[in-house]
Amino acid sequence: MSIKKTMGIIVLIGTTAVLIFCFFLYATIRTKSTSLSQFSPFKEWMGKTVTMDKEIVLLREKVKQFEDKKYPYLLIDSLHPYWPYLDERMELGDYTLVEKLPAGVKFHIEKAVQFTGGVSGSSTPFVFGTISYNGKNYKIGYQWGTMDVARFMDKVKACWQFHLAPWQPQTDTAYYELPAAQWW
């Protein structure tokens, strides 16, 4: 076998190995997602139009928490776990205020998705939908739900709890089991 053929085979094998490595690296670190629309407590709200019973704030994020480009705005209300940090995040330029909306605004819930960061491995559930106000439609995402790490570490599958959303009449104190986000 000639040296040219040998070098060609080595380059081909090396290039293939690099491409396979890059593919697996991408697959490992990319954010994964899976639909939660058929899981409780989300399935009870899918396709419904609800009324916000408190003032809400619509924000644009500098670096988005979720990858769905059809929903450019983030919704936060005064009972949301991120609310205490809102002013600081706006001062830092992480958030830009789009609109403050009064109680009574209607929110049509369209889907729920769990995002899992490829690097951190932490999961974040979101509810997506549309708010119509003063002739404008806002496509929004609302981060809803946190994992109780102690329950998760104790291997309790029902380890997700949900704070009072701006459309709920009372807090749901139950814990729920949610699936991990899928690779593809």
Image: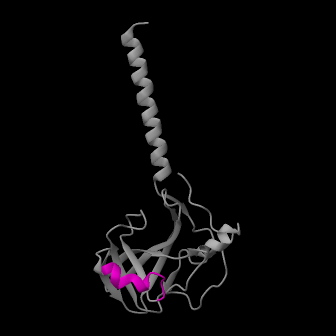
Q: Is residue 83 magenta?
A: yes
- Tell me which corner region of the image, top left, top right, bottom left or bottom right, holds residue 106: bottom left
Q: Is the magenta region chiefly helix, strand or loop?
A: helix
Residue 176 in picture, x, y percent from top left: 66, 74
Q: Which residue is at 38% across, 92% downward?
A: 102
Image-based side of 162 in relation to 72, left or right: right
Residue 15 in picture, x, y percent from top left: 40, 29
Q: Which residue is at 39% across, 75% downward?
A: 74
Residue 97 in sight from this viewpoint: no
Q: Is residue 5 magenta?
A: no
Q: In the figure, 66 relative to 41: above or below?
A: above
Comparing 109 with 85, the one in front is 85
Q: In the figure, 16 relative to 178: above or below?
A: above
Q: Which residue is at 37% across, 64% downward?
A: 69
Report the span colored magenta.
79-90
Residue 94 in picture, x, y percent from top left: 32, 74
Q: In the figure, 140 relative to 100: above or below?
A: above
